[in-house]
Amino acid sequence: MDPKIVVKDLNFYYGNFHALKNISIEIGERKVTAFIGPSGCGKSTFLRTLNRMNDLIPDTKLTGKVFLDGKNIYDEDVDVVEVRRRVGMIFQVPNPFPKSIFENVAFGLRILGVNSKSVLKEKVERSLKAAALWDEVKDRLNDSALKLSGGQQQRLCIARVLAVEPEVLLMDEPCASLDPVSSIKIEELLKELKRNYTIIIVTHNMQQAARVSDMTGFFLMGELIEYGKTEDIFSNPRDKRTEEYITGRFG
């Protein structure tokens, strides 16, 4: 199967700071790919290059190419809004809107021009089911999303992204602010979602990366040091720096 995303010779700068250095990688379709590494090593910056979220940050520069299904998303003729629909982002801290549960999930659909009540109802229900939240909220869809627990809010944010039918899910430490029980639910959800989506996750939790991912990449000081099958990275890393990080000697 052809890779879903191919990155070639990617460099990224915040002003004069060289944050990402010559990154080249292929990310497989319908797999969970995890990126690990110490704080400030470039993981989250790299994640945001995959749907052009860094475009919103002033005084930044990118060189290189990011191909999504063979098309460079940084070409001048690319619709950035469409890129972000196809490549959705879930953030570290759940960010539900101060609206009802239903309207949170319907938000992106309404922006895309979907106004049919029956279509909205069907898509909201389907998205909440896909995010393993439907059974918990189906009787209170008109309640404020802010009343949900942290774990439920994160799954609601996942449902909100799923509603606009993306192909890739970017997750920037999606369990960092959650309790262990909620984290386990998110991990179980990832295993279900990868049947239909390409998932890329940044995590500080190496046990989590080992549990949920098919492929793992190790970042250090803006470089992708090592990338391969998760079981190989954790049991037999090729680079000494990867081994030192995994065994807790730094980071």
Image (cartoon, rainbow, N blue to C red):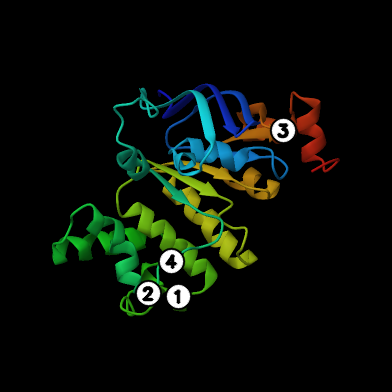
Give the residue drawn at x 25%, y 55%.
111
**Residue highlighted by disc 4:** 96
Earlier along the polypeptide chain: callout 2 or callout 1? Answer: 2
Comparing labels 2 and 4, the label whose residue is closer to the camera = 4
Q: How far apart are labels 4 and 1 at the CA level?
A: 7 Å
Looking at the rendered structure, the secondary structure element under dot 4 is loop
User: Residue 221: which numbered mark, if any?
Assistant: 3
- Residues at circles 4 and 1 in contact by the CB criterion of under 8 Å: yes
Question: In the image, what residue type sits under mark 1?
Answer: Leu
Q: How far apart are labels 2 and 1 at the CA level?
A: 13 Å
**Residue highlighted by disc 2:** 137
Earlier along the polypeptide chain: callout 4 or callout 1? Answer: 4
Comparing labels 2 and 1, the label whose residue is closer to the camera = 1
Q: Is residue 127 above or below residue 4?
A: below
Q: Quadrant of residue 102?
A: bottom left
- Residues at circles 3 and 2 in contact by the CB criterion of under 8 Å: no
Looking at the rendered structure, the secondary structure element under dot 1 is helix
Looking at the rendered structure, the secondary structure element under dot 3 is loop
Q: How far apart are labels 2 and 4 at the CA level?
A: 14 Å
